[in-house]
Amino acid sequence: MRSFRTATLLALPFVLASTLAAPARADVKDGVDAWQAGNYQAAVAEWRPLAIAGDADAQFNLGQAYKLGRGVPADLAQAEAWYRRAAKQGHLQAEDNLGLVLFTANRREEAMPFILASAARGEPRAQYVLGTAHFNGDLAKQDWPRAYALTKRASDAGLGIASARLAQLDSLIPLDQRQRGLAMLPEIERGEQQARLAAVNAAAPPAPKPAPASPVKVASLPASAPGTSYTPPPVIGAPAAKPASAPIRSIAVPPSPAASAAVAAATEATAEAVAATGQPGTTYAPPPASGKLPPKPEPAKAAPAKPAATPAPVRVHSGGAASPWRAQLGAFGVETNARNLWTALEKKNPAFADRQPYLVKSGKLTRLQAGGFANRGEAESFCTAVRKGGQSCLVVDK
Protein backbone atom coordinates (compact mmCIF):
# COMPACT_ATOMS: atom_id res chain seq x y z
CA MET A 1 0.00 0.00 0.00
CA ARG A 2 1.32 3.40 -0.89
CA SER A 3 2.37 5.49 2.09
CA PHE A 4 0.93 8.97 2.27
CA ARG A 5 -0.44 11.46 4.75
CA THR A 6 -2.33 14.71 4.44
CA ALA A 7 -2.51 18.06 6.16
CA THR A 8 -5.55 20.30 6.50
CA LEU A 9 -6.75 23.17 8.66
CA LEU A 10 -9.21 22.51 11.43
CA ALA A 11 -11.60 25.36 10.81
CA LEU A 12 -13.40 25.49 14.14
CA PRO A 13 -16.62 27.45 13.53
CA PHE A 14 -18.70 29.11 16.18
CA VAL A 15 -22.31 27.98 16.03
CA LEU A 16 -25.78 29.27 16.79
CA ALA A 17 -27.45 28.11 19.98
CA SER A 18 -30.58 29.33 21.74
CA THR A 19 -31.59 26.88 24.43
CA LEU A 20 -30.42 28.47 27.68
CA ALA A 21 -32.12 30.92 30.00
CA ALA A 22 -32.69 34.50 28.86
CA PRO A 23 -30.42 36.25 31.42
CA ALA A 24 -27.38 34.33 30.18
CA ARG A 25 -28.27 34.81 26.53
CA ALA A 26 -27.93 38.55 26.57
CA ASP A 27 -24.40 38.36 27.98
CA VAL A 28 -23.30 35.68 25.54
CA LYS A 29 -24.66 37.77 22.68
CA ASP A 30 -22.81 40.81 24.01
CA GLY A 31 -19.64 38.76 23.77
CA VAL A 32 -20.51 37.72 20.22
CA ASP A 33 -21.11 41.35 19.24
CA ALA A 34 -17.75 42.33 20.70
CA TRP A 35 -16.02 39.47 18.86
CA GLN A 36 -17.57 40.47 15.55
CA ALA A 37 -16.36 44.02 16.14
CA GLY A 38 -12.81 42.74 16.67
CA ASN A 39 -12.80 43.44 20.41
CA TYR A 40 -11.72 39.95 21.43
CA GLN A 41 -10.71 40.82 24.99
CA ALA A 42 -14.15 42.27 25.70
CA ALA A 43 -15.76 39.13 24.25
CA VAL A 44 -13.66 36.90 26.50
CA ALA A 45 -14.55 39.07 29.50
CA GLU A 46 -18.26 38.53 28.75
CA TRP A 47 -17.95 34.78 28.26
CA ARG A 48 -15.58 33.81 31.07
CA PRO A 49 -17.96 34.25 34.09
CA LEU A 50 -20.75 32.52 32.18
CA ALA A 51 -18.44 29.66 31.22
CA ILE A 52 -17.36 29.24 34.85
CA ALA A 53 -21.03 29.24 35.86
CA GLY A 54 -21.72 26.37 33.43
CA ASP A 55 -23.06 27.99 30.25
CA ALA A 56 -22.15 25.48 27.49
CA ASP A 57 -22.12 28.04 24.67
CA ALA A 58 -19.87 30.38 26.65
CA GLN A 59 -17.57 27.44 27.39
CA PHE A 60 -17.41 26.55 23.69
CA ASN A 61 -16.74 30.16 22.66
CA LEU A 62 -14.04 30.52 25.31
CA GLY A 63 -12.45 27.34 23.95
CA GLN A 64 -12.47 28.93 20.50
CA ALA A 65 -10.74 32.05 21.83
CA TYR A 66 -7.94 29.95 23.38
CA LYS A 67 -7.71 27.83 20.24
CA LEU A 68 -7.34 30.85 17.95
CA GLY A 69 -5.33 33.01 20.38
CA ARG A 70 -7.74 35.96 20.23
CA GLY A 71 -8.32 37.97 23.37
CA VAL A 72 -6.15 35.47 25.27
CA PRO A 73 -2.82 33.78 24.54
CA ALA A 74 -3.20 30.72 22.30
CA ASP A 75 -3.37 27.69 24.60
CA LEU A 76 -4.52 24.31 23.24
CA ALA A 77 -4.66 22.82 26.73
CA GLN A 78 -7.13 25.52 27.83
CA ALA A 79 -9.09 25.12 24.58
CA GLU A 80 -9.34 21.38 25.15
CA ALA A 81 -10.49 21.88 28.75
CA TRP A 82 -13.30 24.25 27.76
CA TYR A 83 -14.36 22.08 24.81
CA ARG A 84 -14.51 19.09 27.13
CA ARG A 85 -16.69 20.90 29.68
CA ALA A 86 -19.12 22.01 26.96
CA ALA A 87 -19.14 18.55 25.35
CA LYS A 88 -20.14 16.95 28.67
CA GLN A 89 -23.26 19.13 28.56
CA GLY A 90 -24.20 17.84 25.10
CA HIS A 91 -22.69 20.67 23.03
CA LEU A 92 -22.18 18.83 19.74
CA GLN A 93 -19.83 21.34 18.11
CA ALA A 94 -17.62 21.25 21.19
CA GLU A 95 -17.54 17.46 20.92
CA ASP A 96 -16.57 17.72 17.23
CA ASN A 97 -13.72 20.14 17.94
CA LEU A 98 -12.52 18.19 20.98
CA GLY A 99 -11.98 15.07 18.89
CA LEU A 100 -10.08 17.00 16.21
CA VAL A 101 -7.90 18.81 18.76
CA LEU A 102 -7.01 15.51 20.43
CA PHE A 103 -6.18 14.00 17.04
CA THR A 104 -3.98 17.00 16.25
CA ALA A 105 -2.12 16.50 19.52
CA ASN A 106 -1.31 12.93 18.40
CA ARG A 107 -3.62 11.49 21.09
CA ARG A 108 -5.31 9.56 18.34
CA GLU A 109 -6.72 6.63 20.27
CA GLU A 110 -8.29 9.03 22.76
CA ALA A 111 -9.67 11.08 19.88
CA MET A 112 -11.25 8.24 17.90
CA PRO A 113 -14.47 7.84 19.98
CA PHE A 114 -15.20 11.53 19.35
CA ILE A 115 -14.21 11.22 15.67
CA LEU A 116 -16.53 8.21 15.25
CA ALA A 117 -19.48 10.01 16.87
CA SER A 118 -18.91 13.18 14.84
CA ALA A 119 -18.52 11.27 11.58
CA ALA A 120 -21.75 9.36 12.29
CA ARG A 121 -23.57 12.72 12.58
CA GLY A 122 -22.14 13.84 9.22
CA GLU A 123 -19.31 16.15 10.38
CA PRO A 124 -17.16 16.44 7.21
CA ARG A 125 -13.76 16.86 8.91
CA ALA A 126 -14.36 13.81 11.09
CA GLN A 127 -15.55 11.81 8.08
CA TYR A 128 -12.34 12.75 6.26
CA VAL A 129 -10.18 11.58 9.18
CA LEU A 130 -12.17 8.36 9.60
CA GLY A 131 -12.05 7.69 5.86
CA THR A 132 -8.25 7.97 5.96
CA ALA A 133 -8.14 5.59 8.95
CA HIS A 134 -10.23 3.02 7.05
CA PHE A 135 -7.94 3.32 4.04
CA ASN A 136 -4.78 2.84 6.08
CA GLY A 137 -6.20 0.21 8.41
CA ASP A 138 -4.82 2.29 11.29
CA LEU A 139 -7.17 3.07 14.22
CA ALA A 140 -10.00 1.53 12.19
CA LYS A 141 -10.50 -1.68 10.24
CA GLN A 142 -9.14 -1.47 6.72
CA ASP A 143 -12.18 -1.01 4.51
CA TRP A 144 -11.52 0.68 1.18
CA PRO A 145 -15.17 0.94 0.04
CA ARG A 146 -16.14 2.69 3.30
CA ALA A 147 -13.03 4.88 3.10
CA TYR A 148 -14.12 6.01 -0.35
CA ALA A 149 -17.73 6.59 0.77
CA LEU A 150 -16.75 8.71 3.79
CA THR A 151 -14.31 10.78 1.74
CA LYS A 152 -17.03 11.32 -0.87
CA ARG A 153 -19.45 12.55 1.81
CA ALA A 154 -16.86 15.01 3.14
CA SER A 155 -16.09 16.20 -0.39
CA ASP A 156 -19.79 16.71 -1.19
CA ALA A 157 -20.08 18.86 1.96
CA GLY A 158 -17.50 21.24 0.46
CA LEU A 159 -14.35 20.16 2.34
CA GLY A 160 -11.63 20.98 -0.17
CA ILE A 161 -9.00 18.67 1.27
CA ALA A 162 -11.47 15.77 0.98
CA SER A 163 -12.07 16.57 -2.69
CA ALA A 164 -8.31 16.43 -3.31
CA ARG A 165 -8.09 13.11 -1.43
CA LEU A 166 -11.03 11.69 -3.40
CA ALA A 167 -9.16 12.33 -6.66
CA GLN A 168 -6.17 10.51 -5.17
CA LEU A 169 -8.28 7.54 -4.08
CA ASP A 170 -9.61 7.23 -7.63
CA SER A 171 -6.15 6.06 -8.65
CA LEU A 172 -5.49 3.94 -5.53
CA ILE A 173 -8.74 1.99 -5.05
CA PRO A 174 -9.94 -0.49 -7.70
CA LEU A 175 -13.10 0.44 -9.58
CA ASP A 176 -15.27 -2.32 -8.12
CA GLN A 177 -14.45 -1.21 -4.55
CA ARG A 178 -15.15 2.43 -5.40
CA GLN A 179 -18.53 1.40 -6.78
CA ARG A 180 -19.29 -0.50 -3.57
CA GLY A 181 -18.41 2.64 -1.64
CA LEU A 182 -20.82 4.75 -3.71
CA ALA A 183 -23.55 2.19 -3.06
CA MET A 184 -23.08 2.77 0.70
CA LEU A 185 -23.93 6.49 0.48
CA PRO A 186 -27.75 6.23 0.94
CA GLU A 187 -27.27 4.07 4.05
CA ILE A 188 -24.65 6.49 5.44
CA GLU A 189 -26.96 9.48 4.86
CA ARG A 190 -29.85 7.78 6.66
CA GLY A 191 -27.55 6.92 9.54
CA GLU A 192 -26.44 10.55 9.79
CA GLN A 193 -30.02 11.76 10.14
CA GLN A 194 -30.76 9.22 12.86
CA ALA A 195 -27.53 10.02 14.73
CA ARG A 196 -28.20 13.78 14.62
CA LEU A 197 -31.75 13.30 15.88
CA ALA A 198 -30.58 11.02 18.69
CA ALA A 199 -27.84 13.49 19.69
CA VAL A 200 -30.26 16.44 19.75
CA ASN A 201 -32.80 14.47 21.80
CA ALA A 202 -30.11 13.39 24.25
CA ALA A 203 -28.99 17.01 24.71
CA ALA A 204 -32.54 18.34 25.18
CA PRO A 205 -33.56 19.27 28.74
CA PRO A 206 -35.93 16.81 30.44
CA ALA A 207 -39.64 17.54 30.17
CA PRO A 208 -41.08 19.29 33.22
CA LYS A 209 -42.95 17.09 35.68
CA PRO A 210 -46.74 17.59 35.75
CA ALA A 211 -47.97 19.82 38.56
CA PRO A 212 -49.47 17.95 41.52
CA ALA A 213 -53.25 17.89 41.79
CA SER A 214 -54.73 20.76 43.76
CA PRO A 215 -55.82 19.76 47.29
CA VAL A 216 -58.82 22.13 47.06
CA LYS A 217 -62.09 20.22 46.74
CA VAL A 218 -64.65 21.59 44.29
CA ALA A 219 -68.24 21.77 45.47
CA SER A 220 -71.08 20.72 43.13
CA LEU A 221 -73.48 23.65 42.60
CA PRO A 222 -77.21 23.07 42.03
CA ALA A 223 -78.56 23.67 38.54
CA SER A 224 -79.86 27.16 37.74
CA ALA A 225 -83.55 27.75 38.08
CA PRO A 226 -85.51 27.46 34.82
CA GLY A 227 -85.56 30.68 32.82
CA THR A 228 -82.40 32.17 34.25
CA SER A 229 -79.24 32.79 32.25
CA TYR A 230 -75.77 34.20 32.76
CA THR A 231 -73.72 36.16 30.26
CA PRO A 232 -70.02 36.51 31.11
CA PRO A 233 -68.42 39.94 30.67
CA PRO A 234 -66.53 40.49 27.38
CA VAL A 235 -62.80 39.82 27.38
CA ILE A 236 -60.71 42.78 26.27
CA GLY A 237 -57.70 41.21 24.54
CA ALA A 238 -54.39 42.83 23.81
CA PRO A 239 -52.80 42.31 20.39
CA ALA A 240 -50.57 39.26 20.36
CA ALA A 241 -46.93 40.17 20.75
CA LYS A 242 -44.57 39.13 17.98
CA PRO A 243 -42.17 36.41 19.10
CA ALA A 244 -38.74 37.78 19.84
CA SER A 245 -36.00 36.45 17.62
CA ALA A 246 -33.48 34.26 19.39
CA PRO A 247 -30.28 36.23 20.06
CA ILE A 248 -27.12 35.03 18.38
CA ARG A 249 -24.94 33.27 20.93
CA SER A 250 -21.92 32.66 18.73
CA ILE A 251 -20.40 33.61 15.39
CA ALA A 252 -18.87 31.87 12.42
CA VAL A 253 -15.15 32.04 11.79
CA PRO A 254 -14.48 31.71 8.03
CA PRO A 255 -12.34 28.69 7.14
CA SER A 256 -8.74 29.28 6.20
CA PRO A 257 -7.89 29.41 2.48
CA ALA A 258 -5.40 26.64 3.23
CA ALA A 259 -8.29 24.31 4.03
CA SER A 260 -8.57 23.55 0.30
CA ALA A 261 -4.84 22.89 -0.21
CA ALA A 262 -3.82 19.77 -2.13
CA VAL A 263 -2.86 16.58 -0.33
CA ALA A 264 0.91 16.31 0.25
CA ALA A 265 2.73 12.97 0.06
CA ALA A 266 4.93 12.22 3.08
CA THR A 267 8.37 10.60 3.22
CA GLU A 268 8.16 9.37 6.80
CA ALA A 269 5.83 6.49 7.61
CA THR A 270 5.31 7.13 11.32
CA ALA A 271 5.65 10.90 11.98
CA GLU A 272 2.57 13.09 12.42
CA ALA A 273 2.57 16.69 11.18
CA VAL A 274 1.31 18.93 13.98
CA ALA A 275 1.87 22.62 13.28
CA ALA A 276 0.17 25.83 14.32
CA THR A 277 -0.69 28.30 11.57
CA GLY A 278 -1.47 32.00 11.40
CA GLN A 279 -4.95 31.24 10.09
CA PRO A 280 -7.91 30.10 12.24
CA GLY A 281 -7.40 26.43 12.98
CA THR A 282 -4.61 23.90 13.39
CA THR A 283 -2.88 21.74 10.82
CA TYR A 284 -3.23 18.03 11.43
CA ALA A 285 -2.20 14.91 9.59
CA PRO A 286 -4.19 11.66 9.42
CA PRO A 287 -2.18 8.45 9.99
CA PRO A 288 0.09 7.44 7.12
CA ALA A 289 -0.62 4.40 5.01
CA SER A 290 1.66 1.42 5.25
CA GLY A 291 2.57 -1.52 3.06
CA LYS A 292 2.11 -1.82 -0.66
CA LEU A 293 -0.91 -1.54 -2.86
CA PRO A 294 -2.14 -4.77 -4.45
CA PRO A 295 -1.45 -4.96 -8.17
CA LYS A 296 -4.08 -3.19 -10.22
CA PRO A 297 -6.49 -5.66 -11.85
CA GLU A 298 -6.47 -6.01 -15.63
CA PRO A 299 -9.17 -3.77 -17.08
CA ALA A 300 -12.21 -5.81 -18.01
CA LYS A 301 -13.67 -5.48 -21.45
CA ALA A 302 -16.77 -3.44 -20.95
CA ALA A 303 -19.87 -3.73 -23.03
CA PRO A 304 -20.57 -0.77 -25.32
CA ALA A 305 -21.91 1.95 -23.09
CA LYS A 306 -25.26 3.44 -23.84
CA PRO A 307 -25.16 7.15 -24.62
CA ALA A 308 -25.67 9.17 -21.45
CA ALA A 309 -28.94 10.97 -21.11
CA THR A 310 -28.74 14.71 -21.58
CA PRO A 311 -29.11 16.35 -18.14
CA ALA A 312 -32.04 18.61 -17.58
CA PRO A 313 -31.19 22.28 -18.12
CA VAL A 314 -30.40 24.32 -15.02
CA ARG A 315 -30.78 28.08 -14.87
CA VAL A 316 -27.21 29.10 -14.07
CA HIS A 317 -26.42 32.61 -12.87
CA SER A 318 -23.01 34.20 -12.71
CA GLY A 319 -24.08 37.11 -10.54
CA GLY A 320 -27.00 39.39 -9.85
CA ALA A 321 -28.01 39.19 -6.19
CA ALA A 322 -26.79 42.06 -4.05
CA SER A 323 -26.38 39.87 -0.96
CA PRO A 324 -23.09 37.92 -0.86
CA TRP A 325 -24.56 34.98 1.08
CA ARG A 326 -25.16 31.66 -0.64
CA ALA A 327 -25.98 28.09 0.37
CA GLN A 328 -23.46 25.55 -0.95
CA LEU A 329 -24.98 22.15 -1.70
CA GLY A 330 -21.89 20.25 -2.81
CA ALA A 331 -18.68 20.20 -4.84
CA PHE A 332 -18.38 17.91 -7.86
CA GLY A 333 -15.65 16.76 -10.16
CA VAL A 334 -18.20 16.48 -12.98
CA GLU A 335 -20.34 19.52 -13.73
CA THR A 336 -23.23 17.36 -14.96
CA ASN A 337 -23.59 15.90 -11.45
CA ALA A 338 -24.04 19.40 -10.02
CA ARG A 339 -26.72 20.20 -12.60
CA ASN A 340 -28.53 16.93 -11.98
CA LEU A 341 -28.56 17.53 -8.21
CA TRP A 342 -30.15 20.97 -8.62
CA THR A 343 -32.80 19.57 -10.96
CA ALA A 344 -33.65 16.81 -8.47
CA LEU A 345 -33.78 19.19 -5.49
CA GLU A 346 -35.92 21.71 -7.37
CA LYS A 347 -38.48 19.02 -8.20
CA LYS A 348 -38.91 17.66 -4.67
CA ASN A 349 -38.42 20.81 -2.56
CA PRO A 350 -40.50 23.97 -3.17
CA ALA A 351 -37.88 26.04 -1.30
CA PHE A 352 -35.63 25.84 -4.36
CA ALA A 353 -38.19 27.38 -6.72
CA ASP A 354 -37.37 30.95 -5.63
CA ARG A 355 -33.60 30.43 -5.45
CA GLN A 356 -30.98 31.08 -8.09
CA PRO A 357 -28.54 28.25 -8.89
CA TYR A 358 -24.85 29.04 -9.33
CA LEU A 359 -22.16 26.75 -10.71
CA VAL A 360 -18.89 28.10 -9.32
CA LYS A 361 -15.67 26.75 -10.82
CA SER A 362 -12.79 26.10 -8.40
CA GLY A 363 -9.96 24.32 -10.18
CA LYS A 364 -11.32 20.97 -11.36
CA LEU A 365 -14.33 21.21 -9.03
CA THR A 366 -17.76 22.67 -9.69
CA ARG A 367 -19.46 23.97 -6.56
CA LEU A 368 -23.27 24.04 -6.63
CA GLN A 369 -24.66 27.02 -4.71
CA ALA A 370 -28.11 28.55 -4.21
CA GLY A 371 -28.39 32.34 -4.08
CA GLY A 372 -30.96 35.08 -3.74
CA PHE A 373 -30.82 35.48 0.05
CA ALA A 374 -31.38 38.88 1.66
CA ASN A 375 -28.94 38.19 4.49
CA ARG A 376 -26.98 35.44 6.27
CA GLY A 377 -29.87 34.57 8.56
CA GLU A 378 -32.11 33.80 5.60
CA ALA A 379 -29.41 31.57 4.12
CA GLU A 380 -28.97 29.76 7.49
CA SER A 381 -32.73 29.12 7.69
CA PHE A 382 -32.70 27.74 4.15
CA CYS A 383 -29.81 25.37 4.98
CA THR A 384 -31.52 24.20 8.17
CA ALA A 385 -34.64 23.26 6.19
CA VAL A 386 -32.61 21.55 3.47
CA ARG A 387 -30.58 19.47 5.96
CA LYS A 388 -33.82 18.06 7.40
CA GLY A 389 -34.30 16.35 4.05
CA GLY A 390 -30.86 14.77 4.25
CA GLN A 391 -29.09 17.14 1.83
CA SER A 392 -25.81 18.70 2.99
CA CYS A 393 -25.86 22.50 3.00
CA LEU A 394 -23.24 25.07 4.04
CA VAL A 395 -23.64 28.87 4.16
CA VAL A 396 -20.80 30.62 2.34
CA ASP A 397 -19.86 34.20 1.49
CA LYS A 398 -19.20 34.51 -2.22
Image (cartoon, rainbow, N blue to C red):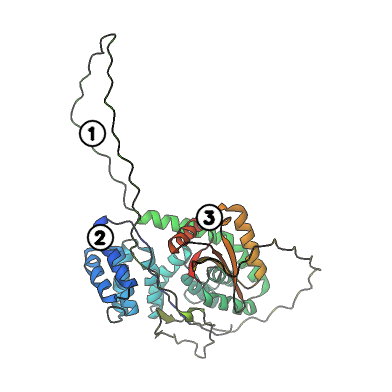
Q: Residue 343: give x, y in percent of width and height.
A: 64, 59
Identify the residue shown where x is 49% and y is 90%.
268
Q: CA distance from mark 1 to mark 3?
A: 42 Å
Quarter of the image where the N terminus is located:
bottom right
Q: Is residue 84 visible?
A: no
Amino acid type, callout 2: Ala
Between 223 and 232, the residue placed more toward the observer is 232
Q: CA distance from mark 2 to mark 1?
A: 33 Å
Q: Crowdedness of circle 1 by 10 Å Cα count: few (<14), some, many (20+)?
A: few
Amino acid type, callout 1: Ala
Could you tell me which secondary element the residue under label 1 belongs to? loop
Nearer the observer: mark 1 or 3; the answer is 3
Amino acid type, callout 3: Gly
Q: Earlier in the sequence, mark 2 or mark 3?
A: 2
Q: Residue 348: give x, y in percent of width and height.
A: 60, 53
For the view shown, which residue lies furthest in the right direction?
A: 304
Between 158 and 239, the residue placed more toward the observer is 239
For the view shown, which residue lies furthest in the left direction?
A: 216
Q: Earlier in the sequence, mark 2 or mark 1?
A: 2
Return the residue at label 1: 213
Could you tell me which secondary element the residue under label 3 belongs to? loop
Return the residue at label 3: 389
Q: Earlier in the sequence, mark 1 or mark 3?
A: 1
Could you tell me which secondary element the residue under label 2 belongs to? helix
Residue 151 figure quarter = bottom right
Nearer the observer: mark 2 or 3; the answer is 2
The reply to whether dot 2 and dot 1 touch (C-beta < 8 Å) is: no
Between 201 and 237, the residue placed more toward the observer is 237
Return the residue at label 2: 24
